Structure formats: structure tokens, C-alpha cells
Image: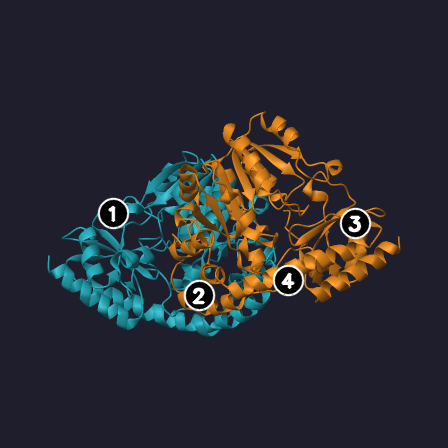
Chain colours: A orange, B cyan
């Protein structure tokens, strides 16, 4: 099974290490919001009953956060569940995945018998989407097109006006556009960059979010899908396993979404560190650093393979994310998270030393 | 979607009721164990990272509880996930379900394209399994046979020696025996009644448990499967969604399994109330009461339909479980949980009054 980040538990077990600086997982370093901690108390009280199988209060809160009706919201056990559910109802269909990207789309599509093809973003095009080339490929005919925006691992955001052009192409070809916006809140402008803001008819749109990344709680397992297509929503609800979101995730979800203090602090942190961490990394001449839109950075080593860098960093107590399993990236690429100021300083220093050593 | 118990959240919303005595869900009335409450503190700390995708510590704890190696344990988001996963890897196969029983097996099997047939337990045989008739049907050839033991909603336990005979039949026909033991800890003898205690070769065995029922935390979503077939275990692990168990469930699971105080108190409660609640209910002459093995009781009204009883009980603030969706039970059947002494007294009194009213 491919994992989002390094499997830190396994690494700790196998190396008998207790503390590790995990730059392989892209989590808000501000940690668990205080608003969630308070909500856990109520969740503990609610544990004696099954969660609301319709998750009305949670879906209302998510709807409000997105200026949408709760009818458009499907909650799940992390974004993973909502990726799997979509491909399950689309079993056997043709899927186009814009790559390199998160490997889970391909895995979920293949498990559910879909025929998967890739649209490769090119290194020579700086991993930006070439609309003309994209349209040519899309016209081959697909049932679903998957785009991660901002993209993991390139950390590039496709701006709303370009996404609208892509969506228009999809609509005219009756291709469902599946957009993974798990990292959208980390971009400059945040939710304003979401494709859900388009004024076009949205029935060919399926958007997923995993707000446990932005709200610093990957251990909680909570994600949601935004669906504007009643048939798709109904089909998913019909095959969904009951109660995949537990009481803690339910209660925390409701309370963190309007935690304006946490949101303001997160914005302040990401704004500052995205810029300063990037410019510090750029000084390491042995690396090509891709300018990040989200809370992680794609790097290409000009000297040694990422595997070597990975091992040397591990020796220094830092985990990075090798990128070979993303597809269309060779063994010189790796990805690191953006964390707090002092961790980022240690990261730059350690990485610089290792790269210099050649 | 069919739910385990009444959807108390919906009932409360629609009737604008705040407090309800929920006799429709079969949960240990002792509530959340203190050992779990303590574990939640650690879970909160662990939330900032993904759970261990291999759930090593949790699987070790469950293994120990069952005198098994952790390699035999698969953890899931409630037993539901493990029901779905099995049918998913068995997609398209022939399934025999011993009925009346929990509707989720049929739903999961059909969603995954299995061909479902039923072996009906007969009212005239007191819903006990007739081995001769069963063997005749089993010989038609099935890939999986599903038995819930003790059975929901009949609350009948098939003793280990009979289960072994059934398992022997299955083995000789290469039929996988899928046993749902979600309520086994509530039976006299508890885990000793489990089919995993057989000395036969166990490769045709797949057992699921949902210890959030016995440990009073349905809101937590934690279940597990015991698999003795490496191929099945591997297939399930390959298609499983990552991290379906969140940090709270992971930590609580580890700590409650050796909470001997909670287990002792539960045994004391169920021993006493199973007997006394049953004998009090038997005094209501308008009801046929089936002797329970687990923490719930199947009842048959001799006078009015269960739907009427359901509505009248609801008016009195008590939810019962109508049984028509279990299959092979007519509209006179309903199921109630066994709860604490004072609740059970109120239940008997209310039910007696309603039945007398005719």
C-alpha cells in the first residue's frame, strides 16, 4: 500500500528511534486546534451511541464553511474513502489522471476495475498544464478526469480561470472533473481558488477535501466530498458503509471550521514560511527548487539520487518524501513539507550540508 | 441504508425529543470504560500524525485478547468495514446467509456483485439451525456461508460443538465460513463459545467482532476480523483503504481489552439482567419471548403488529427495533436490548401496559 507520507511508525520501529522530524507528511504544524480539544469532551459523552448516520450537523457546518447546502456534502473517513467511493460507483469506466500526482487515485481506480490513462505534466514545461495538449488527450473520451489542485507533489496551483477552461472542456465532453483540493486552504487566497466558485453549471464536478491536513489532525480521519450531481451523491450514499466517521471526528469537524483564530494563525504562518523557506532552499545550488503554492515543496537534486539524500537525512533524524512512486518523476526528485520557523531552519542547514558533501 | 438499531438521531430530530431510552441498539449499558477515557488523552497527542497504517500495537493487543498472533488480525472501521472488505474480494461469488439475520451481510454481498441465497431458520423450529436441512442446502455449493453467532435478532447461540459440525461441512465443500461474533462476549462463557477455539484447520474461517458493542463505544467505530487464511488476509490488506481506524479508536482499543474490572462488571450485569429481564417479560401473556443468549431479546406479539407497539412505545419515550427488515420474520416481531436494572423495569412496565391495552 502506498502511503501519503513516509510511514513514520515503521521507520521509528525499524530504526528504534523515538523522535523524528517528519518532513514527509504535509500537516499544519500549528497542530490540533484548541476548539477541537474542547469538542472531544462532548464526543466522549456521545460515544455510547452510534454517530448520526446522516451526519446532519457536521454536513451543515461544512456546507456553511463552503457557502453550500448540506445536500452537496458527503463526509468520509479521510479523503481516501471519498476517492474510493467515487471509483466504486464508476467501476469499469475510463479515467484520465493528470500526473505526476498522489498515487491513491490510480490505486483506487484500478481496484475498482477502471481503465486508467495518464496525462503527463512535463518537466520541460515546469510541470504546468499545457491546455492545448490536454484538450487533445481529453478528446479521446474519458468518464472521469482527475486533477489534484494544488498538485501533490509539485505544489503547483492551477488558477481558477484556467481550471474553468479545463472544466468547460470536461463539460462539453461529458467527463466528470474530479478535483482533489486537500491542500487548497494552504494556497494564497485559500478557498477562493476552489473550482466550486465557478458560475458554470456544476453537475460534472466532484471535489474532495481533507481538512485534517489544514486543521492539523491527520490522526482524526475526516474528509468530505462536494458533489453537485444528485445521481452521483445518491449512488455514493447507497453503497457507503454506515458510520465511517466516528464521534470524535464528527464533533471536532463541527467545531474547528469556524475557529477563526486558528485559521488566522495558519494564514500568517504559511504566508511567511512559504516565502522564506523557499528562498533559503534556493540558495542550495545543488538543488532545483520548485516554487510552492501549498505547504510543501518539490525539489530536484542535481547531484545524487533522492534515495541517498533520504538515507543521509534519516541519519540526521529527518524524514523526507522520495517521489519515485508519484509517476513521471525520476529518482532525483523529493518532496518536503513546510513547517515552523525553527524546524525549517534546521531542515535547510541539514539539507545544505548533505548536498554539499556530494 | 439499513441501520443496526433505530436511527435515534433522526427520531429525535423529527419528533423534537431530547431524551430517549434507546432499546433498539444493543450496547453495553456500563458505557465507556474508564480505561478508554484515559487512553483518549494519548490519542489527542497522537492526532498530529497519521495513525500507524499497520496498527501493530492495536493488532498485538487484539491478538493477545484472543490468544492469537497479530498476523491473524485485521482491524477496521467497525465490523461493517470488514464485512464489506470480505465481499469485495469475493466479488461475484455465491453466498449463503443463514436468516433471519442482520441485513448488512446481504447488502454488502449484493453491492459487490455476489449471488445471495438464504438458509431460513424456521419459526416452527424455534429458529434453531436444523443441521440435516442445512447440509442439504450447503451441498448446492457456495463460496461463502454467513452465520451470525449469537444471532441477531434471535439472540440464539449455536454452541461450539454444533458450530464445529457446521464448519466441518463447510471445509469439506471448500466453503468459507464467515462468522459474525459481534455479540459473543455477552453469552454465558463468552469467548469460550467462539469458533476460533476449534482444533480443526482454520483456513476456511473468517470471524468478525465489533468490540465497541461489548465495550460500550459504538460511536468509536472499531471492529476486527480474525482470518486464518493468508491469501484472504493479503487480498483484504491490498484493497483496504489506509487508516480507516482513527487515533482515538486505536488508543482506546489497546487499553480496554485488558480492562479486567470493566469485563468483570459487565459479566455480573449481563448474567443477572439476562435472566431477570427475560423472566419479567415472560409474564406479559400477549408476548412470546425468545430466551436470549446475548444482550438482546426477540419478541413476538400475539395481538397487534410491531409497528403499532413501536409507535406507542415511542410516545412513552422508548425506542424498540422492528424486525421486518431482517427477513423471514413477519410484522409481529420486534427486538429489544437488555439494559440496566432500572431501565429494564421501566421497559417491562411500559411494554406490559401497552400490550394489555390491546
**B80 relative position to B335: left or right:** right
Q: Nearer the viewer, mark 1 or mark 3?
A: 3
* Residue for point 68% across, 36% down: A121
Q: Which residue is mark 3?
A: A307
Q: Which residue is mark 1?
A: B123
Mark number displayed over residue A43? 2
Q: CA distance from mark 3 to mark 2?
A: 43 Å
Q: Nearer the viewer, mark 2 or mark 4?
A: 4
Q: CA distance from mark 1 to mark 3?
A: 66 Å
Q: CA distance from mark 4 to mark 3?
A: 30 Å
Q: Earlier in the sequence, mark 3 or mark 2?
A: 2
Displayed quadrant of residue B51: bottom right
* Subunit ID for the residue under disc 4: A
**Is the same chain shared between marks 2 and 1?**
no
* Subunit ID for the residue under disc 2: A
Rendered location of residue B25, percent (x, y) = 34, 59
Q: CA distance from mark 4 to mark 1?
A: 67 Å
Q: Residues within 10 Å of mark 2 (few under 14, many from 20)?
A: many
Q: Nearer the viewer, mark 2 or mark 1?
A: 2
Mark number displayed over residue A269? 4
Q: Nearer the viewer, mark 4 or mark 1?
A: 4
* Residue for point 39% across, 53% down: A53
* Residue for point 57% across, 35% down: A166
Amino acid at each position: 500500500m502506498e502511503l501519503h507520507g513516509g510511514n513514520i511508525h515503521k521507520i521509528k520501529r525499524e530504526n528504534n528511534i523515538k523522535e523524528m522530524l517528519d518532513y514527509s507528511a504535509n500537516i499544519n504544524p500549528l497542530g490540533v486546534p484548541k476548539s477541537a480539544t474542547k469538542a472531544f469532551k462532548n464526543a466522549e459523552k456521545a460515544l455510547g451511541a452510534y454517530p448520526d448516520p446522516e451526519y446532519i450537523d457536521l454536513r451543515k457546518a461544512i456546507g456553511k464553511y463552503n457557502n453550500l447546502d448540506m445536500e452537496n456534502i458527503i463526509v468520509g473517513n479521510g479523503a481516501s474513502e471519498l476517492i474510493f467511493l467515487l471509483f466504486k460507483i464508476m467501476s469499469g469506466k475510463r479515467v484520465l489522471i493528470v500526473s505526476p500526482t498522489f498515487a491513491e487515485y490510480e490505486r483506487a481506480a484500478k481496484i475498482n476495475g477502471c481503465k486508467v490513462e495518464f496525462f503527463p505534466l512535463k518537466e520541460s514545461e515546469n510541470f504546468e498544464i499545457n491546455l492545448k495538449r490536454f484538450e487533445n488527450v481529453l478528446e479521446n473520451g474519458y468518464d472521469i478526469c482527475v486533477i489534484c489542485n494544488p498538485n501533490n507533489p509539485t505544489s503547483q496551483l492551477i488558477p481558477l480561470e484556467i481550471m474553468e477552461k479545463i472544466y468547460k472542456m470536461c463539460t462539453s465532453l461529458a467527463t466528470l472533473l474530479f478535483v482533489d483540493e486537500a491542500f487548497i486552504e494552504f494556497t494564497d487566497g485559500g478557498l477562493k481558488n476552489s473550482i466550486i466558485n465557478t458560475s458554470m453549471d456544476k453537475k460534472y464536478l466532484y471535489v474532495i477535501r481533507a481538512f485534517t491536513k489544514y486543521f492539523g489532525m491527520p490522526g482524526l480521519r475526516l474528509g468530505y466530498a462536494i458533489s453537485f450531481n444528485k445521481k452521483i451523491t445518491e449512488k455514493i450514499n447507497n453503497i457507503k458503509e454506515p458510520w465511517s466517521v466516528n464521534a470524535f471526528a464528527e464533533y471536532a469537524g463541527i467545531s474547528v471550521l469556524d475557529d477563526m483564530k486558528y485559521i488566522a494563525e495558519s494564514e500568517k504562518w504559511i504566508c511567511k514560511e512559504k516565502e522564506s523557506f523557499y528562498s533559503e532552499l534556493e540558495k542550495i545550488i545543488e538543488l532545483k527548487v520548485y516554487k510552492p503554492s501549498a505547504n510543501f515543496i518539490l525539489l530536484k537534486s542535481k547531484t545524487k539520487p533522492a534515495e541517498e539524500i533520504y538515507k543521509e537525512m534519516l541519519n540526521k533524524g529527518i524524514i523526507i518524501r522520495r517521489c519515485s512512486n508519484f509517476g513521471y518523476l525520476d529518482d532525483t526528485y523529493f518532496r518536503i513539507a513546510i513547517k515552523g520557523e525553527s524546524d525549517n531552519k534546521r531542515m535547510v542547514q541539514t539539507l545544505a550540508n548533505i548536498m554539499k558533501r556530494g
